[in-house]
Amino acid sequence: MAGRTAGDVLAGYLHHQATDFLRSLRSHGESGPDADSTRESARHLRSAARRIGGALHTFRPLTDEKWADHLRGELAWLSGTLAREHAGTARLDRLLGALQRLTAQTGASAASAASRDTPDPDAAEALLSAGAARAGALLERQITLARTRAHSAALQALGSSRFHAVADAVAVLASEAPLATTADRPAADALLPLAEQAHRRLADAVAALPLARAGQAYHAEARTADSRQDGPWHQVRLLARLSRYAQEVTDPDDTDPRLAEAGRALERHRDAAEAAAAAAAAARTPRIAPATAYALGVLHADQRHEVEAARYVFGRVWLSAPVPEPGPAVRKG
Amino acid sequence: MAGRTAGDVLAGYLHHQATDFLRSLRSHGESGPDADSTRESARHLRSAARRIGGALHTFRPLTDEKWADHLRGELAWLSGTLAREHAGTARLDRLLGALQRLTAQTGASAASAASRDTPDPDAAEALLSAGAARAGALLERQITLARTRAHSAALQALGSSRFHAVADAVAVLASEAPLATTADRPAADALLPLAEQAHRRLADAVAALPLARAGQAYHAEARTADSRQDGPWHQVRLLARLSRYAQEVTDPDDTDPRLAEAGRALERHRDAAEAAAAAAAAARTPRIAPATAYALGVLHADQRHEVEAARYVFGRVWLSAPVPEPGPAVRKG
């Protein structure tokens, strides 16, 4: 960063991301019927869109704020639309995989019967197996339907004039970034305080989480499968992502791997929480068999258990080393 | 133990337990309609019966083996009969408590909705609440019925001639213990190797458990809620109890607290496993509503989660210090 202005660094980052965005857009258009390729392109599109939006958010005071706010909003719309289709695929895989894991209890359990008039555990397994097959079929129907709708919405979005306007704005970014004169200051002077602000917001949000409890494995309160806490955790996930993206701007050669690790735990948290909600929603389908509802209950609890596990992992990662510190690259003013 | 024979020590222990047994028997008969008092007396009866049986098992070569085997069998019959009634009460408390904990999710969850077309988590909570009330009522009916039957069986047993024979045999123990001439050897020489055998059997059984996995909180395989492992864990519980009782004979002033702690984790394991099976069995009740079955599925998974937690705790206790070692009291030959 030495000798460069904040505007140089920020514009460079935005150019890079905008170029990625446009490249992914082209290959998305060229993928044709290749679903894997289309998915890959969509993933890169979302990744670039989030990074542009993240930088425009964190370093907003250095930009033409009105323009930045508008582009950020449009990119959020685009990412969200593309994400819905992706989420469906991932969620179905997760739920069907969980059902498979939960019913992988074959073989003799004669030795497992405890001694005191305990109902036969084999019977419990048989009930779960019967219900799991139906539950899987039900979830597949419902999630595939939602995914098909999301796919149509995504295609429609990508063909819309609204999207073309976004693509045009990003194309502008690829060659020039609408920045404010405040961006003319030395890079470290202007960028670091704003990145610090992002890291602080993250630290504050994490401090508000009951992490001391999350860090004790299997603590009793965790087993309330408390979805009331999901909102604050969701917020931490978004802030952690902003922190990580801020680091990519200020310290690209020395990003904190713990932020990425924490981010992965938070994404697993989000995925599991959404899967649990999907299982519960499926259980409200009219006229399903009790065995199916039972299996969905087991599945819901399993996914809430994974929410708990993700919180535990995040807590351990975070408490080993909180808010990232600016590395040497940025400090060299 | 210095200067005493094995027979002295063993007979002393058996006298003590037999006296407790007879005292509890008297107060059980005198409790009348006081249910708490009756429960306490039954608890002491089972406790003394288990200890007598345990000592007769571990130190069998020092006893009149034919007599010891017979009494041990009869005491096991008695303990088991009394335990069934106790188990019912504890199991119902456990399950109803779990349902309460699982539905303690009141209040605003508006902030907890994630962003990607996620089904409303509030709806999931509403489904669980509706089903939990019915599930609780169903479990209460079924378990109370089983408990009433167990209560009648216990009363019948305590009035039977079979029981009077057991009480007579225990009364004999209170004044003289049918021991073999091998018991005439010095206490340390004769008792320690037999106690060691018990500790080794326990250590071997524990070594066969997948403890390395149990010790990693939230590991993936644990979430198969694998009841195939329950049998081996049940066996470890019984062996740990025998180890603890053996220590009470050889080292009464210095029993290893970790054995007791491990034992508590194993009992929690057993209680949770049986509760999980009861929830699954209830889910097979004909013509229950899907919401009820759903709640029972969540409850089953919750109890299997507690099985996993108990295994984790046991692993940590055990790996901090395995097989108990004889303390100084016994070594002073």
Image (cartoon, coloured by chain):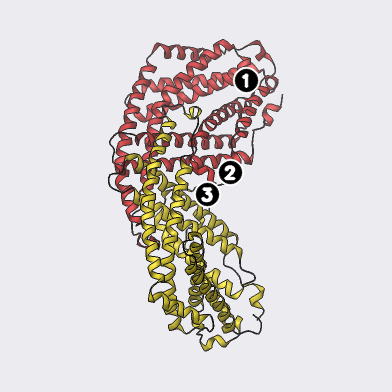
Chain colours: A yellow, B red
Give the alpha-carbon distance from disc 3 to disc 1, as whole Å.
43 Å
Element under disc 2: loop
- Within 10 Å of disc 1 (Cα), the crowding (few <14, some 14-19, many 20+) is some
> Is A231 left, or right, of A330 in this rendering?
left
**Residue labelled with disc 1:** B9
Q: Quadrant of the C terminus of chain A?
A: bottom right
**Residue labelled with disc 2:** B215
Instruction: Single out the mark in the foreground, 2 or 1.
Output: 2
Between residue A239 and residue A155, name the one nearer to us: A155
Q: Where's residue A250, x and y in %?
A: 59, 75
Please, which chain is the residue tagged with disc 1 on?
B
Please, which chain is the residue tagged with disc 2 on?
B
- Within 10 Å of disc 2 (Cα), the crowding (few <14, some 14-19, many 20+) is some
On screen, B256 above or below B191?
A: below
Residue A309 showing in the rendered view = yes
Q: Quadrant of the N terminus of chain A?
A: bottom right
Find residue B185 and report its image quarter.
Answer: top right
> Is B219 left, or right, of A1 in this rendering?
left
Q: Where's residue B60, x and y in %?
A: 60, 17
On screen, A237 above or below A276?
A: below
> Is A305 left, or right, of B117 in this rendering?
right
Instruction: Tell me if label 3 and label 1 are in contact, CB under 8 Å.
Output: no
Q: Residue at x 63, y 76 (%)?
A: A330
On screen, A329 above or below A241?
A: below
Point out the tag, 2 or 1, that comes first from the N-terminus: 1
Residue type at the position of mark 2: Gly
Q: How many numbered dots are placed on residues in this image?
A: 3
On screen, A140 above or below A236?
A: above
Q: Which mark is residue B177?
A: none
Element under disc 1: helix
